[in-house]
Each structure stands twice: as C-alpha cells, then as structure tokens.
C-alpha cells in the first residue's frame, strides 16, 4: 500500500507528480504539476483535483535571465515540433506561429488564443492586431492594438504568424484550448507561456526606458506590474557600469 506523500498530508487535497524529461540537447529537466484529473501517483489518496500546471526550476535555460531578440528568434525557429500523426505540417506551423505571436506581443496565452483572423490590419511597414481584449481588466473593457513588424530581427516571427493566418479563412487564429497550448509550448521550448511575456516586456523596457510607456503599450494597468516580469540587460550598460 502506498504511503501518503507529504503534499497530501496537510489534507487540502493537492497532489503532485514530477516527471523527469530530457531536451533535444540531452539536458535533464523536471516538470512538476498538480494532478490533471487523476489520482495522486505518490500515495493512496483518491482526490481528483485539477489546479493547472506549475513549473519547477529546471536545467533548461534560466527563466530569470534576459536574452536578446536574436536568441528569441532562434528559439522559435529551432524548437522541436510537437508529435502529431495527422496534418503534421499544418499543425507544426500553427504551433510555431503561436510561439512567434507570444514572443512578438507578450500576450497572455488566453489573450493570444482569443484573436480572430479578421483583427489583422496591413500597413506599409507592419501588420497590426487590433482590439485585443486584455484580461484582468474586463471591468474597464480595455482593447489594445499590437504591432507585428515586417522587417528587422522580428520579421521572421511575423512571417510565421502571417503564413499560418493564410491557412485560416475565418474564425479564431488558433484552434486549440489553453491547456493544450501550454503543453505544446512547454514541449517545444522547456518553458511556460509567461516566459515569453517576461522577455517581451523586458525588451520593451530596455528599448524605451519607461515602464509607464510600456504599460500603456501593453494595456497593463499599473507600471509597477512590469517589475514582476522585467529582466534587465546588464551588458547593455557595460560602459556605465565599468566607469563607476
């Protein structure tokens, strides 16, 4: 008979499993999640409680580290595809386009999945996604526009998004739910969706040097919220730091 694990002992019905996996470069990492509707595999408890995925610090990269735009593009381009049996090419393009969109906009996964194909506008230098509903500000009915540049470092990511959009005549841009999207992104990159939100906000703050401006651009209510996501680019300030 299995013994009750420490997590279950406090009686709140929260159970965990931990899976060790290996990424494409042979590095081990662990994914910790509360049970997804199944009994705890560490004890004899019979609770069926789903609280959503939860990350454990792992050997895959450093989620607290700022990485440059080129590294983000390389991550999206080189990420291993999720395993499919049917429509492999179409679904692989969709998954990579979702990664690209998160990296370009810093949207929450639910915000990205809410985007409709008719929300896109084309200008001379960029595409715009218009009237994106910003979560956690529903009482204020915040609708925000996000830019997808056609040129520059992020031009490749924009091309991925637009290539996928060309396969959709109407409806939602992505035909998957939030939980599936989380699993696909974690499989492809070793990170969860908010990693890309953190990196995008960090890039914008390092570029514009203003949390007020960035919070307005992203539809964030308080500039102080960005402090939870911001990762500084210390090397950018090398000259100033070396002269202290």
Image (spheres, rainbow, N blue to C red):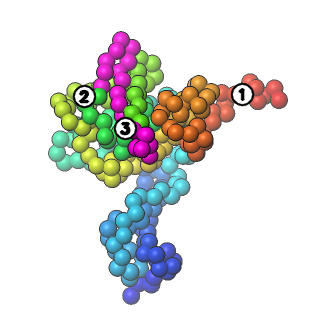
Q: Which corner quadrant of the image does residue 91 belong to?
A: top left
Residue 206, x across and y down, in percent: 60, 29
Q: Which residues are magenta?
A: 120-141
The residue drawn where x is 31% and y is 18% is 122
Residue 61 colored in magenta in the image: no
- Residue placed farthest to the top in the image? 124
Quarter-wise, where is residue 112 in the image?
top left
Q: Is residue 78 visible?
A: no
Q: Is residue 62 visible?
A: yes
Task: Tell me which numbered mark, 3 or 2, is placed earlier along the sequence.
Answer: 2
Secondary element at image label 1: helix
Q: Position of residue 134 (x, y in %)?
A: 41, 39
Q: Which residue is mark 1?
A: 238
The answer for how far apart the CA atoms under marks 3 and 2 are is 14 Å
Q: Earlier in the sequence, mark 3 or mark 1?
A: 3
The residue pinned by badge 2 equals: 118
| 55 sits left or right of 223 in the view | left
Regarding mark 2 in the picture, which secondary structure is present there? helix
From the viewer's side, name the closer residue of 225 and 30: 225
Q: Is residue 238 left or right of residue 229?
A: right
User: Where's residue 133, x and y in %?
Assistant: 37, 38
Q: Which residue is mark 3?
A: 133
The residue sitting at 41% across, 28% down in the picture is 146
Q: Residue at x 36, y 65 (%)?
A: 50
Q: Quadrant of the N terminus?
A: bottom left
Disc 3 versus disc 2: nearer the observer: 3
Mark 3 Cα within 10 Å, few/some/many (few <14, many 20+)? Answer: some
Q: Are marks 3 and 1 in contact (CB under 8 Å)?
A: no
Please say if 151 is above or below 12.
above
């Amino acid at each position: 008979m299995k013994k009750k694990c420490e997590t279950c002992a406090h009686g709140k019905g929260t159970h965990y499993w931990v899976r060790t996996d290996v990424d494409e470069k042979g590095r081990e990492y662990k994914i910790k999640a509360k049970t997804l509707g199944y009994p705890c595999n560490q004890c004899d408890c019979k609770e069926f409680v789903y609280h959503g995925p939860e990350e454990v610090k792992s050997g895959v990269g450093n989620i607290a580290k700022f990485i440059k735009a080129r590294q983000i593009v390389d991550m999206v381009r080189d990420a291993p595809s999720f395993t499919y049996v049917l429509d492999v090419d179409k679904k692989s393009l969709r998954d990579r386009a979702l990664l690209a969109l998160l990296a370009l906009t810093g949207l929450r996964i639910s915000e990205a999945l809410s985007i409709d194909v008719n929300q896109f506008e084309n200008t001379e230098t960029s595409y715009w996604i218009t009237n994106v509903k910003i979560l956690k500000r529903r009482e204020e009915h915040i609708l925000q526009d996000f830019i997808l540049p056609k040129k520059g470092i992020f031009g490749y990511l924009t091309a991925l998004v637009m290539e996928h959009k060309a396969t959709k005549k109407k409806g939602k841009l992505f035909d998957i739910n939030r939980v599936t999207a989380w699993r696909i992104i974690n499989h492809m990159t070793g990170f969860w969706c908010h990693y890309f939100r953190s990196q995008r906000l960090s890039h914008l703050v390092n570029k514009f040097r203003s949390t007020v401006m960035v919070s307005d651009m992203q539809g964030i209510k308080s500039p102080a919220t960005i402090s939870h996501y911001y990762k500084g680019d210390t090397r950018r300030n090398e000259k100033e730091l070396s002269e202290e």
